[in-house]
């Protein structure tokens, strides 16, 4: 009898660590999470979850509880150099991935929801007041040894334990990254920003507000129950990195509201970095979230990029842990995620340089360009649909072929499912593993997957017939079926009509295949997975 694989160790109890631990546990992987602090964070950190992050949480049955803590947002409204409305960026098509495009939240509340869910899973072992202190090279090829030590009043000597994999979700000052000698490349910024999370606020807008006044760039993000975040660029002499001064907070917030000291939930002065780790995998240690990349906050994508990391890593670790794929599958993690994370770091920095500039001439030029673009339909779509943001896609890794849908994320429309024909979210039909969609293909076309290139694949693939147009779906033996509920399914997959679409567990498209492509794609995928 073969020995059961060792648990996976997640280092860091922030949102990214809690997310990947929940995803792993939900897939049946034994996981241990350690956090050096005694509890989850109460600091002013991330404040925005996007639709892709909520879709990822849905796969671990967490979207419902998380939605109770967020404001279903409508994007970001940008204001010009004089505080006048410029444009409202609502993002791409509403509910394209099944959820609102941008959602405001309070990080301590989110972490509590994720932690409660993780503690309820029998596969998970959660240890606070525990820090990682060593990851020695011990020559093992099937596991990794780590030194763990209790912190706080009960701190003591470290003990060595073995795990199958170690996931470093321990933030910008990652211990794992330091112990493994992994550097970061990029730039640090000296500008100091004050951030304050407040209560008793009158703002009820469901969007963030970016004021591009060069004399005082400002961000305001309303939350639930009278909460509101304020961020201000500090002038020289107004404060240094670290604890924020209440008198400064009161003075800067005064134009928007009166505030008392007990209405400041949390605050700090901070600077930001725009850096990416030089490598994301070192043997059996992988980096996620801020441990792998840090970016300015202006695009609201720091946490969301970390959740994308978690979604990408979790299903691959699960496939390897359960023995359905080889370790080399994890080499595709950095190939798939680094390009977009790097582009998002660059984009976040450039967005801050433009939107939050302190240069009056640059601000004037920015406002003129924006108002000119708004005069034309293409320019208006470019701004309001945020087409200037780097799209998340996989151009390398577990992708095959050059079809324009390959590497992109599959949208999530509502679909009709027989026999009830009750509209359902697409992911509820796709399940949790690989999916093969036959888009308006004849029944006999499925026989091409009976060849040896696909027949011997170890990982299960759900097969689904996709009926486009106004037609009723008809399920065949061994396959499921879905039909278009409102035109969104056809919009998403019309380019793949009469083809097969292979969708990975993280909902990114691995391949779009015509009949003659099927054997070759099967062979290539087996090479990566086996």
Image (spheres, rainbow, N blue to C red):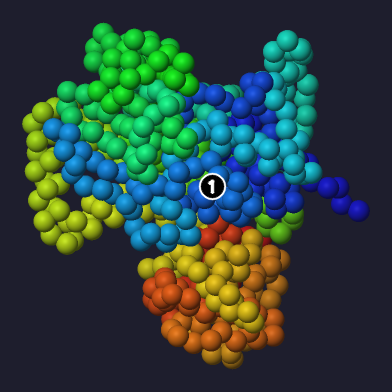
Name which residue lies at 23% across and 55% down: 382
Check disc 1 and report the residue beneath it: 67
Q: Hey, which quadrant is residue 255 in on the image?
A: top left
- The answer to whether residue 379 of the structure is visible from this angle is yes
User: Is residue 105 left or right of 236 when viewed as pictured?
Assistant: right
Query: Measured along the vertical axis of the image, is residue 311 above or below residue 411?
Result: above
- Residue 520 drawn at (x, y percent): 54, 74
User: Is residue 345 left or right of 463 when viewed as pictured?
Assistant: left
- Secondary structure found at label 1: helix
Disc 1 packing (10 Å; few <14; some 14–19; many ≥20) = some
User: Is residue 47 left or right of 7 when viewed as pictured?
Assistant: left
Query: Measured along the vertical axis of the image, is residue 236 above or below residue 275?
Result: above
Q: In this rendered view, identify the residue nearer to me: 114 or 505.
A: 114
Q: In this rendered view, identify the residue nearer to me: 389 or 360.
A: 360
Name which residue lies at 68% across and 55% down: 319
Q: In this rendered view, identify the residue nearer to me: 103 or 455.
A: 103
- The answer to whether residue 518 of the structure is visible from this angle is no
Q: Hey, which quadrant is residue 243 in on the image?
A: top left
- Residue 481 drawn at (x, y percent): 59, 80
User: Is residue 526 left or right of 206 when viewed as pictured?
Assistant: right
Name which residue lies at 32% across and 12% down: 248
- Residue 403 drawn at (x, y percent): 40, 71
Name which residue lies at 57% across and 26% down: 41
The number of numbered discs placed on residues in the rendered structure image is: 1
Query: Measured along the vertical axis of the image, is residue 169 above or below residue 331?
Result: above
Q: Hey, which quadrant is residue 179 in on the image?
A: top right
Query: Measured along the vertical axis of the image, is residue 269 above or below residue 106?
Result: above
- Residue 204 drawn at (x, y percent): 37, 39
Quarter of the image with the C terminus is: bottom right
């Amino acid at each position: 009898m073969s020995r059961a694989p060792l648990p996976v160790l997640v280092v860091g109890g922030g949102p990214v660590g809690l997310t990947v631990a929940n995803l792993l546990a939900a897939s049946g992987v034994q996981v241990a999470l350690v956090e050096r602090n005694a509890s989850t964070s109460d600091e002013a950190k991330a404040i925005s979850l996007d639709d892709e992050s909520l879709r990822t949480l849905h796969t671990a049955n967490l979207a419902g509880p998380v939605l109770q803590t967020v404001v279903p947002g409508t994007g970001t409204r940008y204001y010009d150099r004089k505080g006048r409305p410029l444009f409202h960026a609502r993002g791409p098509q509403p509910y394209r991935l099944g959820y609102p495009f941008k959602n405001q939240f309070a990080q301590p509340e989110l972490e509590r929801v994720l932690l409660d869910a993780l503690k309820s899973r029998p596969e998970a072992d959660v240890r606070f007041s525990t820090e990682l202190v060593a990851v020695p090279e011990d020559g093992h090829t099937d596991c990794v040894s780590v030194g763990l030590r209790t912190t706080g009043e009960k701190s003591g000597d470290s003990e060595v334990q073995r795990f199958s994999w170690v996931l470093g979700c321990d933030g910008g000052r990652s211990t794992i990254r330091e112990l493994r000698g992994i550097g970061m490349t990029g730039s640090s910024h000296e500008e100091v920003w004050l951030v304050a999370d407040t209560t008793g606020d009158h703002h009820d807008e469901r969007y963030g507000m970016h004021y591009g006044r060069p004399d005082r760039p400002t961000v305001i993000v309303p939350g639930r129950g009278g909460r509101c975040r304020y961020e201000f660029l500090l002038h020289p002499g107004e404060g240094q990195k670290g604890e924020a001064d209440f008198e400064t907070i009161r003075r800067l917030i005064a134009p928007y509201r009166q505030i008392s000291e007990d209405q400041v939930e949390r605050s700090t002065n901070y600077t930001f970095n725009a850096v990416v780790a030089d490598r994301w995998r070192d043997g059996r240690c992988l980096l996620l979230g801020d441990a792998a990349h840090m970016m300015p906050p202006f695009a609201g994508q720091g946490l969301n990029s970390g959740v994308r990391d978690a979604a990408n890593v979790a299903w691959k670790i699960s496939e390897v842990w359960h023995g359905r794929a080889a370790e080399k599958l994890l080499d595709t993690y950095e190939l798939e995620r680094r390009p977009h994370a790097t582009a998002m770091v660059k984009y976040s920095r450039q967005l801050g340089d433009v939107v939050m500039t302190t240069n009056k001439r640059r601000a004037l030029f920015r406002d003129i360009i924006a108002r000119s673009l708004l005069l034309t339909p293409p320019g208006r779509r470019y701004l309001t649909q945020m087409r200037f943001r780097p799209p998340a896609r996989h151009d390398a890794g577990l992708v095959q072929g050059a079809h324009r849908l390959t590497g992109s994320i599959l949208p999530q429309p509502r679909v009709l499912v027989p026999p009830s024909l009750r509209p359902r979210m697409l992911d509820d039909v796709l399940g949790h593993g690989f999916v093969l969609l036959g888009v308006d293909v004849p029944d006999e076309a499925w026989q091409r997957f009976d060849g040896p290139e696909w027949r011997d694949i170890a990982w299960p693939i759900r097969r689904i017939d996709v009926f486009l147009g106004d037609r009723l779906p008809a399920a065949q033996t061994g396959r499921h079926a879905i039909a278009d509920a409102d035109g969104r399914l056809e919009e998403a997959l019309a380019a793949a009509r009469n083809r097969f679409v292979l969708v990975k567990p993280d909902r990114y498209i691995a391949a779009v295949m015509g009949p003659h492509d099927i054997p070759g794609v099967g062979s290539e995928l087996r090479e990566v997975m086996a």
